[in-house]
Every structure is written in structure tokens, then in C-alpha cells.
Image: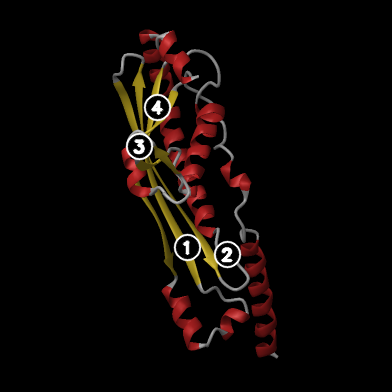
Amino acid sequence: MKISYLLRTSWLWLGIFVLSQGCRTGFDLATLQPVPPSQEKLPRLMLEFDDESFDALYPITLAQYEEYDEDQGVLYATRPQAHPRFMDLKTITERSMERSMTLASGPYYGRALLKTTHHSVERGGEIFMLLSGFSMFTLNLLGMPVSNLVSVVELEMELYDARGNRLKSYIGQGTDRLWQGFYVGSTSGNRSVHASAVKMALLQIQEQMTDDAPMLREVFAKIGPMKSESAAQQE
């Protein structure tokens, strides 16, 4: 009696687990939405990406993005980056800055430079891999995951005033995990966990910026906006 009850409840919890993970089987475009709006927004800032740090962590695919320079006679990679995870990071950051972290209109009062100091998407869950092999994947047919993907992203955002003086530097780290198996996870899972990790890192940066918002607004107002001609070139 007790054994049959345990079997029934185990199947129930296994089904709940599979269904809960199944909602992340594909890449959801909603993941690219900005972080929630801040109560203490900063003046409008010009967002820039540190190419050197991104090139090292998000390699360009020449087969997808290449042009032929007739004058030089060489092939060269074109920006934006071809790596889909870089494009996701760029999209989330731009939307978050424009809609949630700073004012969306008005003159630019400075720059925000974003760097990636760490980025990894690794496969974990060695115990599940071991059990999968011992059971000849029978347990996976019953719903047990094969492995999981763990993404870790560390971002650094530097704020500069209109004169180019660095005011503050903020660091945020995000981590997300996605189980993968016969019924859960997908080939696009690495994009999903990476995008979620990026949002977590940006949220940490946003919280720090919110704490310093009164001081930063005072400094930006004192220095004034950037020169109109410089801002116009970035429009």
C-alpha cells in the first residue's frame, strides 16, 4: 500500500517537474524585454559597448558576416557581432537603458560604457549524466534530465559625464540554469539561460545606480549636457 502510494506520488511530482521545465523548451522572445523600470531614473545617457571585451567573449563568425574590400583586397568582419548571444545582450541592454534606467528623451548628459568581464555557458549535472549512462537512458525516457546548462555573466558599466570624467563604475553578476533532457530543454537553451543571466546582472547594476541616483543627477546637472553636435552624430 505504501509502496504503491509512493509510486503514484513520484510520478505526479515527476510530471510536474517535466511540465514546469517544458515551458522553457524554446527561446522565448519575451526574455529580451528590458528590466523593470527604476523609480530613480538618470538623465539620458549615450550607451556604448566596449568592443575589445565583447570580441574576446563573443567571437565573430566570418562565414556569416564578411565583406570584400576591393581597395585592400581582403575579407573583413563587419559589425554588429554575429554571435547571437551578443545580439541578445545588446538588445536587452539598449531596451533597459532606454525604457527603465534612464530617460528616453532629452539631451545626453554623458555616456554609459558597458563591458563584459566574464561570460560562460557550461554543461553541468554530472550525476544525471552518470545515471543516464548506467540506465541506458531508460530513466531519461521516464523524465529524468540528462544534464543542465549553467550560464554566468558579469557586466561592468562605467558612467561618464559630458566632459569625459568617469563618475562611477558598477558591476553586476547573473546566473541562470536550465535542465535538459528528452522532454525539456532545447538547442536554443544556451541563449535562454544567457539572456536571463544578462537581465540578472543588469538588475544588480540598476539597483546600485538607483541608490546613487540623487548624487548622479546632481553631478550631471552641474556639468550640463553634452555638446549638441556630438549628440546629433549619435542619433
The first of marks 3 and 2 along the sequence is: 3
SS label for mark 1: strand
Task: Estimate the x, y position of residue 227 in percent, counting from the top left.
Answer: 40, 9
The reply to whether discs 2 and 1 touch (Cβ–Cβ < 8 Å) is: yes
Amino acid type, label 4: Ala
Amino acid type, label 2: Gly
Q: CA distance from mark 4 to mark 2?
A: 35 Å
The first of marks 2 and 1 along the sequence is: 1
Asked if residue 76 is positioned above or below residue 145 in the image, the reply reads above
Task: Estimate the x, y position of residue 219 in percent, counting from the top left.
Answer: 36, 14
Q: Residue at left 61%, top 76%?
A: 143
Of residues 148 and 215, which is closer to you in this image?
Answer: 148
| Of labels 3 and 2, the one closer to you | 3
Q: Residue at left 50%, top 57%?
A: 190
Return the residue at label 1: 149
Q: Residue at left 53%, top 13%?
A: 106
Q: CA distance from mark 1 to mark 3?
A: 26 Å
SS label for mark 3: helix
Q: CA distance from mark 3 to mark 2?
A: 31 Å
Return the residue at label 2: 185
